[in-house]
Structures are given as C-alpha cells and as structure tokens.
Image (spheres, rainbow, N blue to C red):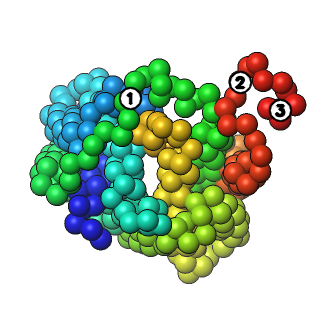
Amino acid sequence: MKKNLLPLTMGGFGIGMTEFVMMGILPDLARTLHISIPVAGHLISSYALGVVLGAPLLVAIAGNYPPKKILLGLMALFTVFNILSAFAPTYEIMLVTRLLSGLPHGAFFGVGAVVASRLAGPGKEARAISMMFAGLTVANIIGVPLGTYIGHEVSWRITFVLIGVVGLITLMGIYKLLPEMPVEGESNLRKDLKLFTYAEPWLILGVTAIGTGGLFAWFSYIAPLLTEVAHFEAGQITWILVLAGVGMAVGNLFSGLVADRISPIKATMLFLALMVVSLIVVYYVSPFKGPLLAMTFVTGAISFSLGAPIQILMIRAANGSEMLASSITQAGFNIGNALGAFLGGLPIAAGLGYASPQWVGAAMAFMGLLLAVVVYFRQHGTRPTVIDVDMPAEVIA
C-alpha cells in the first residue's frame, strides 16, 4: 500500500466502527438512556439518514476546495460529533448527534475514492479504492468487536470516545501524509446537479441500492439465523461475525484486482451473480453448522467485492462531477442497507423463518444484476449520453 493511502484506510476504519458498533451496544445504550431496544434502533436509522443527506450536500458545498482540505473538514466533523455522542445525556440529543455523525460518512468515502483513483497508477484505480474500503472491513474484524466489548464491560460512552480518537489520528494522517491536490475544474451546484440528467448514474445508483440490498437482507438477520436455525450459542456470534469480517476484507481486496483486470462493469455483474448463488446456498445449508460457517466467510467475501467496482463505475460516469457522483454511491449503499433490512424482515414477520431473508436477498441481487447488464450494454453500444426532453422517443430508446 502507498503510505499516502493510509489516512483514507484509517478514516474507513473509524467510519466502519461507528456505523456497525451500534448493533452490538444497542442493549447497553437503551438501558443507560432508559428507552426500549426498538426505540434505540432509531439511532441506527438516524445515522443512515445522515449519510444519505450529507453525501451530496457536503460535497456540493465544498466542491471548489482542494480534496485534502475537504477530507480534513469532513474528518473534523466526524470526530467532533462522535465525541459529542459519548456525552449525550438523553435519547433526543443522541438522536441528533448520530444524525450529524452520519453526515461526513458518504462524502468522505466519495471524495476519498476520487483521491485514491488520482493517486493510483494507470490501471490500478480499483485497487487503490479497495485500500480505502479495507479500513471498513478491518473495522468489522477488530474495531467493532473491541468497541462492543468495551460497551458491554465498561461503557458505551468510552466506545465513542475511542472512535473520536481514531478520528484524531486520521486527521493527523491526512495532514501529514496526503499530498496537496489541485481542484480539477470549477465546481458549482448547478453544474454538479446536471449529473442527474444522465441515465447512467441513475442506473448505477439502482445497481447499488437494490443489488447491495441483498447483502443487508443477509447480514441484518445473521444473528437469529445463527442461533435459531443453526443453534449456535449466543456467545459464539461475535467470533462468527469476525469470520464474516475476514471474508469481507479478503473479498474487498480481491475485487480491486478483478475490476482492474476485467473492467468494473464485468466485475460488478460477476459478483452480483455470485451473490445470488451464495445466498441461495446459505438458505439450504443454514441448519448445518460447518457449511454455514464456510458460507458466512464466502458470502462476506462476495458481498464486499462490490464496493470498489461500483465506485469506479460511478466515477467514470460522472461527466465532470466525480466527487458528487462518488458520494452519491455511498448514499446508495445506505439505501440498500435500509431496503435489505426492511424487505428481509417481511418473510420473518410472515412466519417463514429466519432463513427466509436469503430468498429476498437473492432476488434483490438478481435485480441488481439485471440493471448491471443494462449498464453493460449501454457502455458497449450506441446510446444518447444525456436525457433530453426534446429528444425524439425513438432516439432515447
């Protein structure tokens, strides 16, 4: 890894920790704030809403600043709001601080992906971006289990202080290691919003939100799948999640190599097809501990293989609005998070069992694959670049 990519990896680690540790410390937080666990779950939704709002908003505001200054500002916001979360005295204040903590998430990954691609050598853009997302996967191996343990044994407030410390280290890393980079072209909101008049970014956003929803339909209900269907002990779940995290880390790094070798759109189609197969296999092996453990690793690897190629796809379709487009992809991932968790819960509520979300996930991944096929044929055929209301219908088609 180039040392100037290390701050991006560290930032990914901190963001991954603050996003996923909430699932582990939710009961502790609910008890301290005197609320029910379902109400505490709104704090997860609040963070996701912050990601969706902040990704395009902050990039649009900061678009004319050099990338290094933008990343410093975003990580400063991340650090301050996570430390404020540690001292939130009430549920209502915590709800606000979690919303604000989510604002820099998508923008940091969006700007970071553009920076990583500029720092990479020719033909190595996807690998560079996967280095940034490696921090997110390592967070699931180390940061989230550590933060969950501290939340259980000491205090969840210390967990958020620790996340703030990660933010401070990242700030120093960005300042010391990340080179100054010029602004590429003048940015303004009107120009950037023109991105949404092009069909391809919408299609890629659909691939992201629907296709990656398959991951979250699986991952959102992995705990009851392990305990109620495979009959693992509750105390074993943390270590099985570490196994999933290791799979995510391996898949993320492997995907960068594949995307650079065969093209981002072909890699996206390949990994979505593999996700369909993987989730169906999970359904059938879920009563058996050994095969389910193996598929937990495999499914984690396949699911996180989508990050780098999708990010490159969106950057190349940006038409001069790379940072906004890249940040929008992060909003898409969080929409996928919400969709996968909601739709995956429907068959459980209907009494079909804790393995049933795998079919929902497989269906979502398949729909994402179909959209990716459309993107592939658009990239390899004659098509209009921009949607024009005055363009004849037969030309648009």
Residue visible at 61% across and 44% down?
204
Q: Is residue 299 above or below residue 100?
A: below
Residue visible at 26% across and 33% down?
65
Of the residues under marks 2 and 3, which one precedes in the sequence? 2
> Measured from the top left, where is residue 356 in percent x and y?
68, 55
Amino acid at pointer 3: Val
- Point out the image quarter for the N terminus: bottom left
Cα–Cα gap, marks 2 and 3: 10 Å
> Measured from the top left, where is residue 290 in percent x and y?
56, 81
Local crowd at mark 1 within 10 Å, few (<14), some, or many (≥20)? some
> Measured from the top left, where is residue 258 in percent x and y?
55, 71
Q: 280 or 100, which is in the foreground?
A: 100
The answer to which quarter of the image holds residue 45 is top left
Cα–Cα gap, marks 1 and 2: 22 Å
Of the residues under marks 1 and 2, which one precedes in the sequence? 1
Residue visible at 36% across and 44% down?
111
Q: Which residue is mark 1?
A: 187
- Point out the image quarter for the C terminus: top right
* Tag shown at residue 362: none
Going by the image, does 325 lie left or right of 348?
Answer: left
Kindly state the secondary structure of the residue where label 1 is placed.
Answer: loop
Amino acid at pointer 2: Asp
Kindly state the secondary structure of the residue where label 2 is placed.
Answer: loop
Q: Which residue is mark 2?
A: 388
Q: Which residue is mark 3?
A: 395
Q: Residue furthest right?
A: 394
Going by the image, does 389 lie left or right of 29?
Answer: right
